[in-house]
Amino acid sequence: MSITDMHQDLTGSERIAPRSDSPHPKTVNTSPLISAQKLTKQYGAAQAVFSNLDIDISEGETVALIGSNGAGKSTLLKCLIGLLPHSGGQVSVLDETFSGRPQAAQARRIRSDIGFVFQKHCLVSRATALTNVVHGMLGRAGSWRGWHQAIASPAWRQSAMEALDSVNLVHKANERVDQLSGGQAQRVAIARALVRKPKLFIADEPAASLDPKSGHDVMQRFVNLSKKNNITLMFTSHDMQHALQYADRVIALKNGSIFLDQKSDDLTAQDLKGVFSG
């Protein structure tokens, strides 16, 4: 059955993607997609959130960013993509280089190549899953059509259906988001990010609001989609099992510095305990 046919007939049972036997495929390209030198973030005269960080993220890599509450994980993510200005150092992301904050035109180019997934989904609860995925096209040329699937172009609607199919939710396309489970809603959020065909996924605690089973299911699907489409993925997490199981690499922040930066295959849960002690 084609996606078009499924759009017309949305009944049927949900397919569950098989889990990979291997923990996580490895990086396919070593060219840096994100590079930060001496990156510092400070608010006024307060102590710096972090200082003099040097980070390189390769194309196709999946990176878990961990640390205790207040360590600066979310702040670092936002500084790396220009959503927050940094106080010192330089960032290069998606072929754009800036200090402080990107220029307006740079910011638009950067954001056009990023798909965002947040802990709280950030979906329109009274809209359908399909309309929420079409919202991922907002910011593109002619994006007023992205406000609702009924006024979206046929190509955008088709792309949104394909994105829903990729997270096994095409049969839920015409259901309101507030009628979906938490795990299904987060998969809609992933589809919304995927429909942009980004080069980079940024996910801030994407499984934190879910029960353990749904959390693992969402992370497995997210990582599989990233690898399949060669999308670089950076996600924050308090779940050390998620960091070790789903990331190629783990970066830990502690006391304003990089405490640890290693391949996940070289780490154990015991190795990560120092991130949260002291």
Image (cartoon, helix red, strand yellow):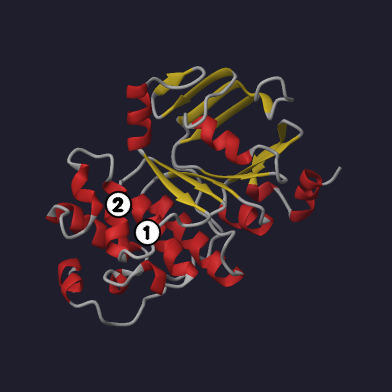
* Residue 69, image x, y percentages: 71, 46
Q: Quadrant of the C terminus?
A: top right
Q: Residue at x 64, y 48 (%)?
A: 264
Mark 1–mark 2 distance (CA, rounded to whole Å)? 9 Å
Where is 97 relative to 273, above or below? above
Mark 1 residue type: Val
| Residue 135 numbered mark, or none | 2
* Residue 26, image x, y percentages: 51, 48
Mark 2 residue type: His
Disc 1 designates what residue?
124
* Residue 120, image x, y percentages: 51, 57
Q: Are marks 1 and 2 in contact (CB under 8 Å)?
A: yes
Q: Secondary structure at mark 1?
A: loop
Callout in the foreground (1, 2): 1
* Extreme residue in the left direction: 154
> Total of numbered circles in the picture?
2
Q: Quadrant of the N terminus?
A: bottom left
